Amino acid sequence: MDLNSSGLMTGKLALLHASLRKLERVAVAYSGGVDSTLLLHAAVQALGPDRVIAVHAVSCLNGAIQREQALALFGTLFPDGVELRRITVDPLGWEEFVENTDQRCYFCKKRLYRRFSDEFSEDTARRLLDGTNADDVLQHRPGMQAIRELEVMTPLLDAGLSKMDIRLLAQQAGLPNHALPANSCLATRVGSGRRIEARLLQHIDMAEAFLHRSGYPGSRFRLVQNDIHLEIRHEEMERFQREDIRSAFQTYVSDLGYGFNFNNVTCR
């Protein structure tokens, strides 16, 4: 990083801390991803651990590996002082979500963040914070509407922090997840219009966990109409061409009840 870039990053971080210090108490929506982890870290720095809580959703939408990593990371970074509230939700009971229209993320975020806010409804001074960044607003993200409607604060976005900025700041802060691939809930792997079912989510989780154990973290197992589409990180695509690895994956998904065409493998 050159001096100009370093100065810009320092300025953005100072802006983030300044905006957080204006708040009395906060609750950070914590997923274990780099965005929410940096936001939580910055909130603790700005306000102190006694004025910060983390709220973490526990549901069928989070893969087993993702849940384990998120909780382990929190325990490593915030062993004392910061309270973690694990809040169980059941998205499969939300019919408007299960229908899986292009507004699925809006309905999910609205329900989830209302539930988070209910957790500290008596503490009217505590504000809910979300890790949306400046790159997110350039994409189609229906959940942003729910964030605005509920008046959830987005300090990373307000400070003008992009995904790359966040990764750089997370690296400087020593956050071990600064370079991990971006992740999202398992429902994003199911093509729009196909109902979200527990069986589908379980199969997606199992297939991605198999790929993770096989040395392909960050891979996506997508169900699009009647086909499987597999996304492998660019740097791992050449290794995935090995016949033994492809055969092992094909056998695994066949046991889950899916056929697989290797023409449906792309880079992410």
Image: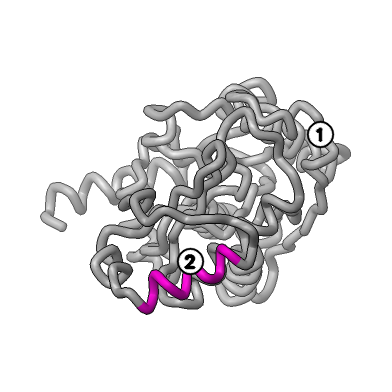
Query: Mark 2 = which residue?
Result: 250
Q: Residue at x 62, y 44 (%)?
A: 187
The foreground one among 172 and 135 is 135
Q: Which amino acid type is marked by label 2?
A: Gln
Q: Is residue 247 magenta?
A: yes
- The percent coordinates of residue 20 (x first, y second) are 54, 43
Which range of residues does the magenta coloring cover? 244-254
Can you name the residue that lies furthest to the right here? 122
Disc 1 target residue: 94
For marks 1 and 2, the one nearer the N-term is: 1
Find residue 31 and report its horizontal and vertical position in percent. 60, 54
**Does residue 89 sit above or below 62 in this rendering?**
above
Q: CA distance from mark 1 to mark 2?
A: 33 Å
**x and y, in percent, of residue 205 in the image:** 62, 60
> Which amino acid type corresponds to the residue marked 1 in the rendered image?
Trp
In the rendered image, the quadrant that contains the N terminus is bottom left
